[in-house]
Amino acid sequence: MSNLEQPRKGSARERLTRLAPLSLPAIALVASVVMVGCNETTFLVPPPTLRGIAIPLPPPSIADQVLVYIDVEGSLPMGFDHPNNQAYLYESTTERGYFVGTDGLEFVVQDVLINVNNNCLETWFIDGVDGEESSLVAYKAVVLEGDEACAAPSCSAVDDVGACVCLEKWTTGCG
């Protein structure tokens, strides 16, 4: 046989050089399968919802007060009515934290001290089954005046001068 008829057998180095472009994607595929297979999948647990405010001993005028004690009513998302759930509320301007057990999906945090001019109520819960923490949601308690403004379910009863405290949800925090 002449040199033209025989297939050329390259060195091992030449063969590896030809296979190199194929090996990088193969290594990446194997690494990603190993990485995904070893990581535990986590799902976002939705936060609780604050529904309303009650003022146990309302002053004659909420608008004239700076610090007021309120009771905050809330509920957990559907499907989380497990025993031993804990609902948390943190008021960042007074730097006070509160936690309560839930009654099914409902909870009430009592005697929360807020500054009616500047407050941020952050709330979340911990699932009593697996200890997983929900995402956090922020609310502000604001003073409103008038029967129409205070008619929302998230508002307290009106005081003697027609003012109330209402919850406003802040999707980006209370900044």
Image (cartoon, grey):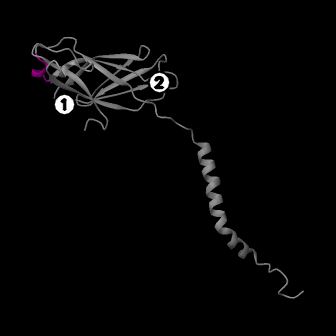
Rendered location of residue 123, percent (x, y): 34, 27
Q: Of residues 104 and 131, which is closer to you in this image?
A: 104
Distance Cα–Cα, label 1 vs label 2: 30 Å
* Quadrant hosting residue 107: top left
Vertical placement of residue 115 versus 57, above or below: below
Residue ID at (46%, 31%): 45
Residue ID at (39%, 22%): 87
Q: Amino acid at mark 1?
A: Asn
All told, the count of numbered labels is 2
- Secondary structure of the residue carrying numbered label 1: loop
* Residue located beneath label 2 in the image: 127
Q: Of residues 28 and 77, which is closer to you in this image?
A: 77
Residue 75 magenta = no
Residue 81 as seen in the image, left or right of residue 49: right
Vertical placement of residue 172 versus 9, above or below: above
* Quadrant hosting residue 98: top left
Tag of residue 87: none
Residue 31 as seen in the image, left or right of residue 150: right
Give the extent of the magenta segment.
61-66
Rendered location of residue 27, percent (x, y): 64, 58
Residue ID at (31%, 31%): 138
Q: In which quadrant of the rendered image does the N terminus lie?
A: bottom right
Is there CB contact under 8 Å for labels 1 and 2?
no
* Quadrant hosting residue 137: top left
Crowd band around label 1 with a 10 angstrom C-alpha radius: few (<14), some (14–19), many (20+): some
Residue 64 magenta = yes
Q: Of residues 143 and 31, which is closer to you in this image?
A: 143
Residue ID at (66%, 63%): 23
* Residue located beneath label 1 in the image: 118
Crowd band around label 2 with a 10 angstrom C-alpha radius: few (<14), some (14–19), many (20+): many
Q: Amino acid at mark 2?
A: Asp
User: Which is more N-terminal, label 2 or label 1?
Assistant: 1
